[in-house]
Amino acid sequence: MLKEINKDKKMSEKSSWKNQIVEESFQTRCIDGVVLKGKLLIPESPKAIVQFNCGTATKKEVYHKFLKYIAEHNFICCLWDYRDSGESAPSSLKDCAYVYSDYGTKDMPAIKDFLTSKFPDLPFLILGHSTGGQQVGFMNNLKGIKGAINFAVSTGYYPNMPLSYRMNAYVFFYIFAPLSVLFTGYVAAKRFGFMEDLPKGVAYQWRAWCSKKDYLFDKRFYGKSVPLGNYQNFHFPIHVYWTVDDTISNEANTKNLWGHIKSAKGITFTKVVPKEYGVLSIGHFGFFRRKLKSKLWKDVVFRLEQMLED
């Protein structure tokens, strides 16, 4: 079983009306020239910076209410779009040569450089959802990070998923995606309500990783098509939330990913059971619903503050 931790939590909640949040748009440039765009949520008296890395092909706006709550507790929050989505998307995905690992090797480092340059005197933390936590190990500028908190961060190995979801994944990756690329030059998923659109290189590398139990750590990829990165030598504490009703980041896939990762400051896990948090379901995206504000979101703030103290 995954290691569980429970702590008595004592945290003074501040009323949001006492802490106005200024929202500021920004853009920055990656090492290969790609421009990324996003939004900063800046409280009156910030005590740290939080870089939030989204899930694959997910609108950053999905996370806005959650991050506003975090900002109300005096954390500057950075919400941004990967190079192929939202405000950062190019005019034509058809002509993109992007691959999935660009998120971690190019985009995430560029955001951190921007934030540390803009707020050089503040401690730095990372929050990640799904691939937003998976690819942090690819970053080449992890120095100075005080801790990371992850939601639904695991492998995406199909055979560990329920049969119905597994079949949907196969149809998407092996039938819909190739046909879409054939007719449009990219994966035109948005018009069908699947997710945001994706360049073919991103979708195909993502598909390749999901076909292997060890995901990006499979010997076909690790140290070859992707760098070794810092997965074996993280120097900050990491906490992972996973929920029992997540079809993707279930217990097996969570164990598979984190079995390949080491941190000198430890890696801990919270197993989330929806009914214990007052909801019927959470799944892969439900961590960021307002219904979880009073318990789970509060716990996240507690852990961020603990990471700053440690």
Image (cartoon, rainbow, N blue to C red):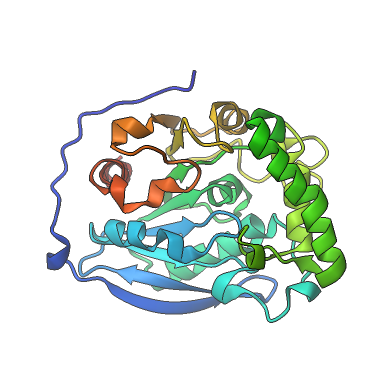
- Foreground of the two, 89 or 245: 245
Quarter where residue 149 is shown: top left
Question: How many marks on residues?
Answer: 0
Coordinates of residue 281 in the picture (x, y in percent): 41, 39
Q: Locate residue 105 relative to residue 179 in the image: left or right.
A: left
Whether 200 is drawn above or below 233: the answer is: below
Question: Residue at point 38% right, 30% down?
Answer: 273
The residue sitting at the right extreme is 182
Residue 36 visible within the image: no
Coordinates of residue 218 in the picture (x, y in percent): 76, 35
- Foreground of the two, 132 or 120: 132
Quarter where residue 190 is shown: bottom right
The residue sitting at the top extreme is 1
Coordinates of residue 111 in the picture (x, y in percent): 52, 66
Whether 191 is drawn above or below 3: the answer is: below
Quarter where residue 58 is shown: bottom right
Question: Residue at point 26% right, 41% down?
Answer: 295
Q: Locate residue 198 relative to residue 145 in the image: left or right.
A: right
Quarter in which the C terminus is drawn: top left
Whether 298 is drawn above or below 255: the answer is: below
The residue sitting at the bottom extreme is 91
Coordinates of residue 160 in the picture (x, y in percent): 66, 29
Q: Locate residue 141 relative to residue 309 in the image: left or right.
A: right
Residue 282 visible within the image: yes
Question: Residue at point 20% right, 35% down?
Answer: 9
Question: Residue at point 51% right, 78% down?
Answer: 27
